[in-house]
Amino acid sequence: MRLRFFLPLFSAAVAASLASASDASACGGCVVPPEENTVVTGHRMALSVSPKQTVLWDQIEYAGDPKSFGWILPVKPGAVIEVSTDAWFETLDATTTTTIFAPPVSCPNSGGGSGFGCGAADLAPRASNAGGDDFDGSDVTVVHRGTVGPYETVTLNTQTPGALNEWLDKAGYTIDPATQPVVDAYVKEGFDFIALKLQPDSSVKEMKPVRVIQDGASPTLPLRMVAVGTGANVAITLFLISEGRWGAKNFENAQIPVDLLSWDFSNNSSNYGTLREKALGAAGGATWLTTFSQPKALLSPLTSINFGKRTYSSGDSFDFVDTIGGAYIQRGIQNDEATDDGLGIECGTSFANVADSADMVVDPCPPGKPSDDPSCTSVTAGQIDARKLACGKLDDLSVALDGLHPKDVWLTRIEANLPRAALGQDLVVAPSAAQAPVDNEMRAAKGENIEALCGSAAAALPDRGKSNRSGGGGGAMVVALGMAATALLGIARRVRARA
């Protein structure tokens, strides 16, 4: 039985109030002809960094003619591009989105009770480079051609300024001549380029997520290329997967001041949107806001603000999983992205022995080879087989952790609304000075217009729990409503029975 992927009904209203005023969203480098009226309408990225490899995920939503869409990314030589899964970003986004709870309130003759409210912030086999170089008589070398999911891909190399723009233009990519200095700068720095466009017969309207894998640690997001195809501002949500909490190194970092959070009972809303907009506007808009950061968040249960362990489920299911990694597997099975109907409830729910391990996750299969290929070797002592973290084709989690030690891995969500002036330099991420968790569940520190809830005699109660972490001081109702909200925030499914 299929169950829908459920997000809180209250998210839509608050998301609308928090939406940034960007003209377009980022996308590596999006190239679309303006006469086609093809515009980017949404963007999410994820970056996993280990000493072994760096993985960049990218997903774009856009409106317009699919054949007009193109995507270009500067990469280190040897990088490969793979198709990812919708479940990966769906899960990361839903499980880390911000939720604001109203402060506990005492209503006369009601036996306790509380106000309650919340809101949401914002919104394949590996391609082989084998086969030799492809020369077409120009100053651009075609390192690799292929297809990934619904896309045609090409990896390019040049050392000649201006040559790449000319090649791409002849190949059907519409490149604004004004971008040539940006492209030439990456050429001078020794980058290759991956270009991607939808196959001619594709009817896809939302970009299937892709991931680019590069050898070694490369903790940089190519914002100079992101500037291609954007307007005055660009909104970016970036998920960081690394050992320790990471943040921006060469931009300002910010967090919401929780002591200034307030809840207006007259319209059941918080001032989170106002505080968020102010935080993102600091330093002329060149600021990244950390809205979630937790150690071992992908593989270990997290604690809710109102009660015990968080669990994730669809709105009409009583089958719960207790980790983000498990929710990803369940969501992918629901999406039919696992491609194996025999996968059952045990798939993706046995992370307990891995979450606290000091061993390194290692993929023993060569790039481009399936997990059951004879060329795959065995892991050695002190290593964890990455294939244990996959579920059929649902391998984003195993790819993300390859080269990392699970006990040290954090999941961090940072957001920005960058003006064009801030896109003149790439984003460099690094370990944060403060290795402290940031929770996406927060309780407003004060209430306004409390009388709208239960009359003029209403009074706010002190929060007897730890500030914005464990709460629990609002009586039975706040506990019950908190449980309901956490269930709504979940995204697992009832696992199909084995055939």
Image (cartoon, rainbow, N blue to C red):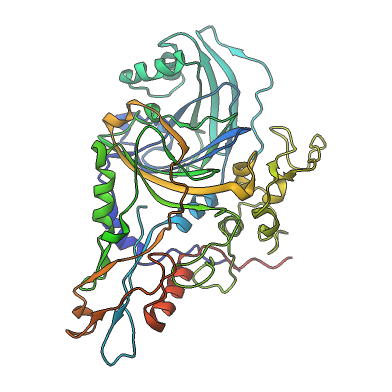
Horizontal and vertical percent position of residue 446: 26, 68
Q: Residue furthest bottom?
A: 109
Q: Is residue 140 above or below residue 469?
A: above
Residue located 40% across and 16% down the image: 185
Residue located 51% across and 55% down the image: 91
Horizontal and vertical percent position of residue 311: 54, 67
Residue located 66% across and 27% down the image: 128
Could you say which is closer to the camera, residue 314 or residue 461?
A: 461
Residue located 36% across and 17% down the image: 180
In the image: residue 476, left or right of residue 141:
left
Horizontal and vertical percent position of residue 138: 50, 8
Q: Is residue 376 visible?
A: yes
Q: Is residue 120 above or below residue 233?
A: below
Q: Is residue 394 visible?
A: no
Horizontal and vertical percent position of residue 240: 49, 43
Looking at the rendering, which quadrant does residue 317 occupy? bottom right
Q: Residue furthest left?
A: 456
Could you say which is closer to the camera, residue 266 or residue 447?
A: 447
In the image: residue 3, left or right of residue 235:
right
Please identify the quadrant where the N terminus is shown.
bottom right
